Amino acid sequence: MTKTEKTARLAARARYLAVFIGLIAAFAVITVWNINSGSVRIPVKEIARIIFLREGEQMNIIWKLRMPRIIAAAVLGGGLALSGFLMQTFFGNPIAGPFVLGISSGSKLFVAMVMIVALRYVNFVSSWMMVIAAFVGALIAMGFVLLAARSIRQMSMLLVAGIMIGYICSAATEFLITFAQDSDIVNLHNWTQGSFSGTKWEDVRFFSILILGCLLAVFLMSKPIGAYQMGESYAQSMGVNVKRFRVILILMSSLIAGCVAAFAGPISFVGIAVPHLIKMLLKTAKPILVIPASFLGGGVFCMFCDYLARTIFAPVELSISTVTAIFGAPVVIAMLIRRHGEKS
């Protein structure tokens, strides 16, 4: 190894370390920021005492209201970024994502159907029911996208097809909500717009186990993912069963996207923007680095957007998808312009 190569390797490692330290620091700062924000301001010393010693006057506010919501934004936001990375790997294009391809809208439709039917006839909706419904909806929407992908070679047209699938699912969801009579679903419309509010500790335990388990599984798949990024022929030469691997990517990305939609509704552009920004910061597409960094970045991004959604027009609360679109859509537009410039 030459001196130039050693210097370049050391510089790359320093950059990787700086990115991860920056993400962890941002995660810590935005966590405290979110805990402290709201109608009741809580000093940092009081926050530390409540979290570590479980005592203090504002303990109920932090533990029952703010902490579950913060963890939801962190874990579900990280899951969205992870799902987007898997879809981008599957399609071989950085513009692919669960929201743009209509996957989240498919999940939203099926969860809305289950919630309406369950609340009307059995007056009970379990976390399992919601996740299974969201997973089925995500798989069906993904199936339509894959059918379109077989006849549409241009990624821009595939995105249009995905957007149309999303519009159809959203229209069907609004139709169901319009004709639903049960008074128990009064908050369903707000959920369909995307929100982390109302998260309970039972929900946190459920989706944390599911999404963190998926994160671990995807991280352990870093080597075959890296081989697949080099092309199907190369992956096969490295011993990867490409057909089975592609099925695993579809199932894993759909499960994660469905879980997020089940608990927070559809959230736009996180799955596209965050993995792209992480790759730009790291200056590499190595899965062993991009996977954990994307998860951290997705959590930080959603926590920041949730803070703005709660506080910028308080006491009125914006939908989380509105805020993520404001920051994420320009990234997508920039990617499209950049890719067009590279081809021309």
Image: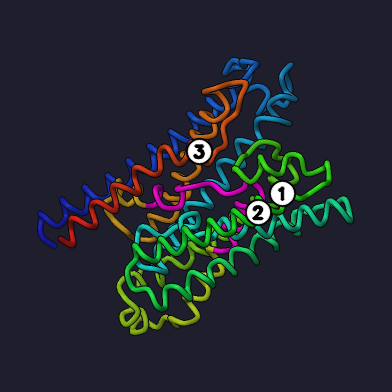
The kind of residue on which mark 2 rests is Thr
For residue 255: magenta? yes
Alpha carbon separation for disc pair 2 and 1: 6 Å
The kind of residue on which mark 1 rests is Ile
In which quadrant of the rendered image does the C terminus lie? bottom left
* Above or below 36: residue 301: below
What x and y, as percent, mark residue 147?
A: 48, 76
For residue 45: magenta? no
Task: Name the element at disc 2.
Answer: helix
**In-front residue for pair 128/45:** 128
Task: State which region is magenta.
Answer: 254-275
Q: Which residue is mark 1?
A: 177
Q: Which residue is mark 2?
A: 173
Task: Name the element at disc 1.
Answer: helix
Q: How packed is label 2: few (under 14 Cα within 10 Å), some, or many (20 or more)? A: many
Q: Are marks 2 and 1 in contact (CB under 8 Å)?
A: yes
Q: Which residue is mark 3?
A: 322
Left or right relative to 186: residue 81 = left
